[in-house]
Image (spheres, rainbow, N blue to C red):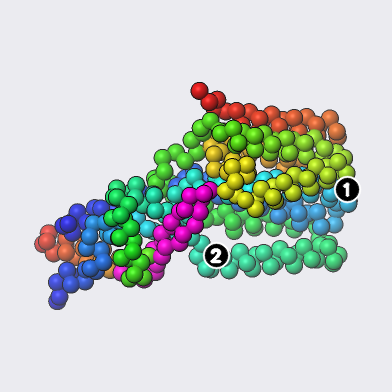
Amino acid sequence: MAHPRHKLDDAFLTPVRLSLMAALPKEVELDFASLRTVIEVEDSVLSKGIAHLEKLGYVRVTKGYVSKRPRTWVASTAKGRRAFSAHVEALRAITDVAQQ
Amino acid sequence: MGSDHALAAVARMRERTAGLSRPHAWLLLWGSVLVSVYLAILLALVSDGPTPQTTAVTFGLMLPTMLTYSAVVAGARERFASRLRVPGAYSAAVAVAVAVYFVLGGIGIFGGGFPWWVAAFVGVAAFLLLGAPFIVYLARGRSAVIVEDPWRSHPLTPHAVVVTVGIGVYLGLTTALSSSVIPLMFVSVVGMLALSVSSLAPAAKWSAAQAGVEWGRTQWRCFAAGIGIMFALAVATVVAGEAIAPPIAVLCGVLVLAAMVTSALTPRAR
């Protein structure tokens, strides 16, 4: 049987992208500033993470305005959530293997 | 990052952002109550009972409240860092319900009408459909914690104070005039025009939406109290089948105005 690490998704191998995907549940979308607060990263790092996941089709970005300020909304896609679930399962399997 | 650390980070993130925050869910639940009562009363107006005068008075009371709520809540939503994503099946269910509602309205206007309890049933059904997702959120007892206390009240800016007092004058005057149809319709329409113009420029500092961005717990409680009075008068008008006595209408109007003026000035700027 293949080691579970082969099922890890490269997209989630950085802490920021992993946290970003974990912070985006199915039922809500979050704005950029909140993601920055929750994940505790710089704007530029978060932007890169979002852009990477967007290119893979894992998140969807919507731009809008609140008052006169631009606001960016980020939501997970079904494809992204499936990939993330598989990645988390692989992490669990690795942890189980390590504990055996 | 080790796999156990990664799993712990995922769990922490999910704990913090899963679902809606409770204050957000309460706002949406309150909105669903308002819309349900509104739909039920409108349908009751085209059922068998009410006279043209009762219908006019009730419309004159209900439309300002709903328009004001819609304008202000557009801004209030921006106090929250998340937006709800509605599943397609739920949207389809709402679309079917809206179609049924219009068919019932058509029967009421062009057909033979229907008993008042049909309107009450529709109100309950609308609440179950619109409010159920938020009741589930609140019942779960979980809450996303993205923004700390989004309802915290701060002293309003001068623009928001003027707009809030203006809303109080409009709603108070509408309520006070609910015993006489012509003045009520006049004030009601003038206010609705002002709100419509305001909604064309939601980013303008004089707009109702901008006041909504600033409104905190105090303002929403006072607004809820004012709207509650107006809804109670509307229901009383439909049930009684005639306009409310002028002294009661004026007293209610003063209470609505007082609530909104109080909210505009609370908390005081230091």
Q: Residue at x 84, y 30 (%)?
A: B247
Q: Residue B264, percent across and down?
A: 61, 31
Dot 2 or dot 1: first in sequence order is 1
Where A29 sits versus B66, above or below?
below
Tell me the kind of residue under disc 2. Answer: Tyr
**In this picture, residue B143 sits left or right of residue B187:** left
Q: Nearer the viewer, residue B106 or A49?
A: A49
Tell me the kind of residue under disc 1. Answer: Gln
The image quadrant that residue A55 belongs to is bottom left
Q: Residue A16, percent across and down?
A: 27, 56
Q: Residue B149, percent across and down?
A: 44, 38
**In this picture, residue B147 sits left or right of residue B100:** left
Disc 2 to disc 1, how far (Cα)? 38 Å
Regarding mark 1 in the picture, which secondary structure is present there?
A: helix
Name the disc covering residue B90, or none.
2
Q: Decide whether residue A81 is among the magenta residues.
A: yes
Q: Residue A79, percent across and down?
A: 36, 71
The image quadrant that residue A51 belongs to is bottom left
The image quadrant that residue A62 belongs to is bottom left
Q: Residue at x 30, y 65 (%)?
A: A52
Chain letter for mark 1, please: B
Chain letter for mark 2, please: B
Q: Residue at x 17, y 69 (%)?
A: A5
Name the disc covering residue A5, or none.
none
Please name the residue that numbered disc 1 is placed on. Answer: B53
Residue A82 visible in the current orientation:
no
Query: In which quadrant will I find the N terminus of chain B?
Result: bottom left
Q: Is most of the magenta stretch helix, strand or loop?
A: strand
The range drawn in magenta is: A60-83
Counting other residues with Cα less than 10 Å from the Cα at mark 2, is it few (<14), some (14-19), or many (20 or more)?
few
Q: Residue at x 82, y 40 (%)?
A: B178
